[in-house]
């Protein structure tokens, strides 16, 4: 599913299958992602934050796949990706 550059903020995406979707540059701020399947989704530069249904492990996985989280604590750079 191509959702590149789509604003999905405040959407109810509960139990939606987003596996292998193109979510590059999408806005998902405050979206309900409870039970949503994000496996294999391209989340490069997708913006998440203050979402329902995102566990800490999923959050870390999405960050590793280059997603951006707006709800990180100010000054906390422990999860900021740096070039290798």
Image (cartoon, rainbow, N blue to C red):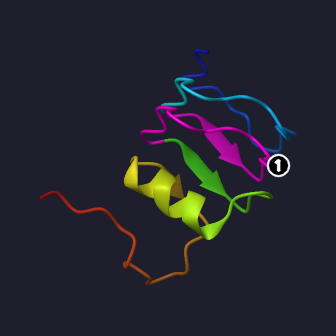
Give residue 77's quadrant in the image: bottom left
Prevailing secondary structure class for the magenta stretch in the rendered image: loop
Q: Which residue is drawn at 68% across and 32% down?
A: 7
Residue 58: horizontal and vertical position, in percent?
A: 58, 58
Under tag 1, what secondary structure? loop
What percent of the width, then of the height, locates residue 12?
Answer: 87, 40
Horizontal relation, residue 75 to residue 6: left or right = left
Q: Residue at x 63, y 40 (%)?
A: 27
**Up-down relation of residue 39 to residue 65 (above or below):** above
Left or right position of 52 against 28: right
Residue located 56% across and 47% down the image: 47
Horizontally, residue 16 falls left or right of residue 21, namely right
| Crowd around label 1: few <14 · some 14–19 · many ≥20 (10 Å) | many
In the rendered image, residue 55, in percent from the top left (x then y), is placed at 67, 64
| Residue 21 location (% of width, % of height) | 57, 24
* Magenta stretch contains residue 35: yes
> What stretch of residues is rendered in magenta?
25-45
Up/down of 7 relative to 10, above or below: above
Report which residue position mark 1 lands on: 32
Q: Taking 79 as reference, is 68 above or below it?
A: above
- Position of the N terminus, as image quadrant, is top right
The outermost residue toward the top is 1
Quarter of the image with the C terminus in it: bottom left
Number of numbered discs on residues: 1
* Residue at the far bottom in the pictured view: 75
Q: Residue at x 49, y 38 (%)?
A: 43
């Amino acid at each position: 599913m191509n959702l590149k550059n789509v604003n999905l903020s405040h959407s109810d995406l509960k139990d939606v299958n987003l596996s292998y979707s193109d979510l590059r540059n999408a806005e998902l701020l405050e979206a309900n992602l409870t039970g949503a399947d994000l496996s294999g989704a391209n989340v490069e530069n997708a913006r998440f934050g203050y979402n329902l249904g995102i566990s800490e492990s999923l959050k870390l996985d999405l960050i590793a796949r280059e997603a951006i989280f707006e709800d990180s604590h100010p000054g906390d750079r422990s999860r900021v990706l740096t070039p290798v």
